[in-house]
Image: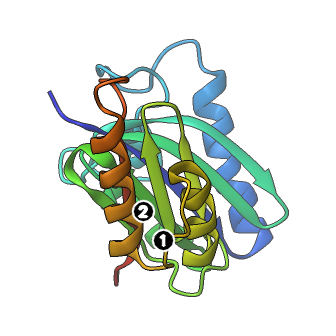
Amino acid sequence: MPNWCDTSYKCVGDLKEVKSLHKVLKYMEKRKTSILKNGFGKMWLGNLVHKLGGDWEKSRCRGEITEFSLDGNVLTINQETAWCEQEGVRQIIEKNYPSIKVYFMEQEPGCGVFYTNDASGDYFPERYFLDSNEDWEYFETLDEAADFVSKIVGIDVEPSVNAIQNALDAYVEEHEEENEDLFYSFHEFEVCND
């Protein structure tokens, strides 16, 4: 059983091509049954790969689309995938739609997978992630994260990844007897080359 990864795509390009890809997703969504038999359902990533002329058996496509939306020439596709972003899907989209660049952000806290290929931060400006037993929080800067964490721990925290995590670890250790489910984990999204 894999750890499930939250993956988001921002497909950016010529409006005609972006709308064409959106139309494919709408087609998949409106079907009564899946294009191909699978364990994920009609929004399985393999259906998208197949519909775009790719071979799902040769592409990493283990996961499903959970939602999608079109805003101008940016198509957002949210997915739940096995372990990490399934780059086979991204590759087939970019192959079929030459004007489209697919930016992604993936997060799988269990194995510490936090990556994006959006180096400029234009589509995924969040660079830091705080996981807790209560909720998830995203931050664009270390200053924002340090301010937020300072309010949790009750002291001023230096805006660095290590200082933030150390402050959270100390806070959890201090309060673990009164709340055994208490945990905090702070992460930085690494920028990768695709």
At 48% from the left and 71% from the top, the residue drawn is 94
Question: Disc 2 or disc 1, which is closer to the eye?
Answer: 2
What secondary structure is found at the residue carrying circle 1? Answer: helix
Left or right, residue 130 beside residue 36: right
Occupied quadrant, residue 174 = top left
- Asked which quadrant contains residue 177, the reply is top left
Q: Position of residue 144 (x, y in %)?
A: 64, 70
The kind of residue tagged 1 is: Glu
Q: Say which amino acid is labelled 2.
A: Arg
Counting other residues with Cα less than 10 Å from the Cα at mark 1, is it few (<14), some (14-19), or many (20 or more)? some
- x, y percent for residue 169: 30, 53
| Label 2 close to label 1 by CB (< 8 Å) | yes
How would you rate the neighbour count of disc 2 (Cα within 10 Å): few for under 14, some for 14-19, many for 20 or more?
A: many
Q: Position of residue 80 (x, y in %)?
A: 41, 38
Residue 77: tell me if it is visible.
Answer: yes
Q: Gap between marks 2 and 1, in whole Å?
A: 6 Å
How many numbered marks appear?
A: 2
Is residue 91 among what the camera can see? no
User: Furthest residue to the right?
Assistant: 72
Q: In this rendered view, identify the residue nearer to me: 47 or 86.
A: 86
Number of the label disc, if any, that sits on residue 157: none
Residue drawn at x 68%, y 36% is: 26
Q: Seen in the image, is 75 located left or right of residue 132?
A: right
Q: Which residue is mark 1?
A: 94
Residue 145, given in percent of the width and then of the height, sits at 57, 66
Q: Which residue is mark 2?
A: 90
